[in-house]
Image (spheres, helix red, strand yellow):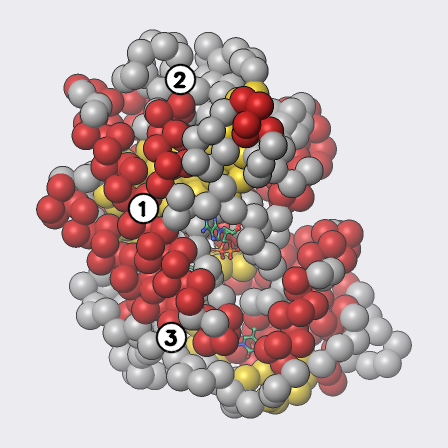
Amino acid sequence: MRGNAVQPPPQARAAAAPALAARPAGAAGSDADSWSKLTRTGGAGAGCRRRPLTLLRADGVRGRAARRSRLIPIDTTCAGSGSPNDSMTILVTGGAGFIGSNFVLDWLADPATRGLPLVNLDALTYAGNLHNLDALRGDARHVFVQGDICERALLDRIFAEHRPRAVVHFAAESHVDRSILGPGAFIRTNVEGTFALLEAARAHWGALAGDARAAFRFLHVSTDEVYGSLASDAPAFTETHPYEPNSPYSASKAASDHLVRAWHHTYGLPVLTTNCSNNYGPFQFPEKLIPLMIVNALAGKPLPVYGDGLQVRDWLYVADHCRAIRAVLARGRVGETYNIGGWNEQPNVEIVRTICALLDELRPQPQGPHARLVQYVADRPGHDRRYAIDARKIERELGWRPAETFATGIRKTVQWYLEHAAWVAEVQSGAYRDWVAANYGRR
Ligand code: NAD
Ligand code: TYD
């Protein structure tokens, strides 16, 4: 499956991902209006025809020579419908990861955007999992390209072939603990990769004219961690909070935010930046707090709580984040930053207790309550104490608020992991096991 276009029949989608299909569309009406204003004749995927698969090597070599080396399939389905100005395709980077795959599935299910095709560029690192997108096999609106955002030649080919009207940039190294053990990959992907993507987008946008140029957007998905750590009584992060990143991860994301800002101010590239709090939900790789606690508890393994467990995060259900991104893409003001959060600050121990209580209810263990598995372990170096998002700007300007409470979102999430044991087993093989040994073996 690795490296192939991912395309299931649409009817399989609803059957395979009922939880995702049932998500609320939120401000769908207003987003639909915005998108239809941008739609030009022949757009919205209406005229998509199946075209032959192009085999493309990262350096652009085609045909027989390409077949002898590393192949990157580029499915040119829906690559635009004729003129350089009428493509409604969007380019998503990192769309096989946790948030990216939720975004891709929701984009293709949302009534406001479901006719609009997308190209999904993902390097399939340890965090990228094509099985997240199994429900899209055979769906001509989704074109998957395995490739690296640092490879400028590949980016140029994708822009030339698909002429995206927007970029939604998720691709990143995203785990703080990994950034502490090996920061190099974070600098490469998050900083150099964002730079390459900005340059490719600038070249593409610079050649556009008229409506297509006016409509083009580069949406950069970032994190609240760029703002640093809050005192317990400090007000939540607003969009004007100073940047004070403390981990290699947050420093690399802060650097990428600054590049995006500079490409707008210097070159006029129409950018949007979102800074979101901690996400949770389906398809999250079980190295992050919530899925790790669920899968460990189910396996009767220790639940490692760092330090005193009183660090506070502001948790947001992933579908709410995806809906916020769609709203910003459709109606956000160019050059602006939007903070996205769940209005749900909780200390880590409270999150772990809630998960244990849900599992006691849904999957009781004869050995006793799941909370017996909690183990306090050595703290993370430089561990930020508290994050909290003030999400009033996105509510005021775009009418977005989270639809899920933590109680509803965490119940859905625990149920999802209970119902997807095969997915969990698959990601727990190989690289995941190596990572567990590297991170927890020394604690
Ligand atoms: P993830 O680690 O689950 O997924 C990242 C994806 O990017 C993977 O599919 C991976 O294969 C891909 N990728 C990595 N390097 C790449 C490269 N060089 N070229 C192409 N693809 C590459 O991350 P996530 O949790 O889904 O986060 C997505 C984005 O959202 C990130 O930019 C992250 O900083 C941001 N964010 C995450 C959270 C959160 O709680 N997870 C919160 C706020 C913001
Ligand atoms: P994480 O999910 O890694 O997200 P982030 O570091 O980006 O906030 O961690 C969330 C919180 O949970 C953070 O304060 C660290 C803590 N944590 C643990 O206590 N134990 C763990 O095993 C993990 C992975 C995280």
Instruction: Estimate the x, y position of residue 286 in percent, counting from the top left.
Output: 63, 64
Question: Which image quadrant for residue 356?
Answer: bottom right
Q: Which mark is residue 196?
A: 1
Specify whether 358 is left or right of 401: right
Mark 1 or mark 2: whose residue is earlier in sequence: 2
Which quarter of the rendering shows the C terminus?
A: bottom right
Q: For the residues labelled 3 and 1, say whether their Cβ atoms are less than 8 Å apart.
A: no
Identified at 77% across, 52% down, the residue is: 422
C-alpha distance separating marks 3 and 1: 23 Å
C-alpha distance separating marks 3 and 2: 41 Å
Answer above or below: position of 306 versus 95. Answer: below
Which quarter of the rendering shows the N terminus?
A: top right
> Could you tell me if residue 406 is visible in this image?
yes
> Could you tell me if residue 411 is visible in this image?
no
Question: Which image quadrant for residue 14?
Answer: top right
Instruction: Estimate the x, y position of residue 360 in percent, counting from the top left.
Output: 76, 71
Is the shortest distance between ligand 2 and the CB of mark 3 under 8 Å?
Answer: yes
Q: SS of the residue at dot 1?
A: helix
C-alpha distance separating marks 1 and 2: 23 Å
Specify whether 179 is left or right of 358: left
Which residue carries the number 2 mark?
Answer: 80
Please state which of residues 288 and 126 is positioned toward the viewer in this rendering. Answer: 126
Instruction: Estimate the x, y position of residue 332 in percent, counting from the top left.
Output: 25, 41
Task: Specify few, some or many for label 2: CA neighbours under 10 Å numbering under 14, 14-19, or 20 or more.
Answer: many
